[in-house]
Image (spheres, helix red, strand yellow):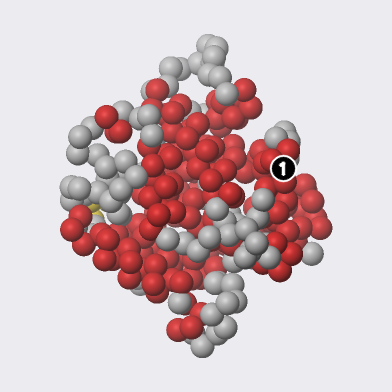
Amino acid sequence: MFKTTWDKEKYMNKLTAYLLEEKQAKRKGGLYHKTQVNLAYNSNRMEGSRLTEEQTRYIFETRTIGFKDEEAVPVDDIIETSNHFVAFDYLLDTVENPLSNNIIKAFHRILKTGTSDAQKEWFAVGDWKKLANEVGGIETTLPQNVESEINKLNDWYNSCNRHCGLDPQSPISLENIVEYHYHFEKIHPFQDGNGRVGRLLMFRECLRNNVIPFIIDNNHKQFYYRGLREFENVRGYLMDTCLSAQDTYREWIKYFNAELIK
């Protein structure tokens, strides 16, 4: 049920409602199904998962593993893939809520529960990192500063329209969503799993703000990483990668239900 303060007809776009309907109906072979498999496969693959797209689909469809005549894969890859399916459902179930620290941490907790990382004393599942880390040899925000930096980032994001002289209640733009993602990855608030959390947040915020969502394809990860590295100087690299991925998802929507984007 939707909260009484959440006017489904006024605020929830047709795409979000459609994905929720397919999820609740447990419909196979539709847009929700395709999104779950592709988002989990590509996002995990970019972070080093050895699971193939077919193996990812098999886990989603059967909730079993049983791969025959294929290379063995680490248990964590399987757990994190299964967790990603749960995280996407959480994304849909909470899409009416404004972005917050609790939502961000919940994504991390879901993704990392039951993994080998969760057994490490220094690894904070569902909480900000405890140890300093780097990404691609680049320093990130120190642990003691993560909370304040994320708070500042969320405050900026949730007031983007006011800063631009727009109606604070109007949807946030794709450009703002992508910029948020850049700053989130630069802060790197978790010990591990930042990319997966960040890409789930982008998809969520696109749905929430009536923007066509997108999935960064593993084949385009070098363009995506370049876009993050060069964002301060050339924002177009990351924007172009996201726009191209958006075009792909738009075609999926047209195939399954063209009425969703009219």
Residue 174 horizontal/vertical position (percent): 55, 68
Q: Residue at horizontal 60%, vertical 76%?
A: 170
Amino acid tagged 1: Glu
**Which is more toward the observer, 129 or 67?**
129
Residue 98 coordinates in the image, percent (x, y) = 50, 64
| Residue extending furthest toward the top | 69
Instruction: Residue 13: tell me if it is visible.
Output: no
Quarter of the view holding residue 8: bottom right
- Provide residue 250's location: percent of width, then percent of height: 69, 56
> How many C-alpha atoms fall within 10 Å of the one at disc 1: few (<14), some, or many (≥20)?
some
Q: What SS does tag 1 mark?
A: helix
For the point 71% across and 68% down, which residue is it? 10
Say if residue 28 shows up in the picture: yes
Query: Which residue shows up at 39% across the image and 62% down it?
Result: 182
- Residue 204: image quadrant is bottom right
**Which residue lies under the disc numbered 1?**
22
Tag count in the figure?
Answer: 1
Q: Residue at x 62, y 58 (%)?
A: 3
Q: Is residue 13 above or below residue 71?
A: below
Figure check: 137 above or below 158: above
Q: Quadrant of the C terminus?
A: bottom right
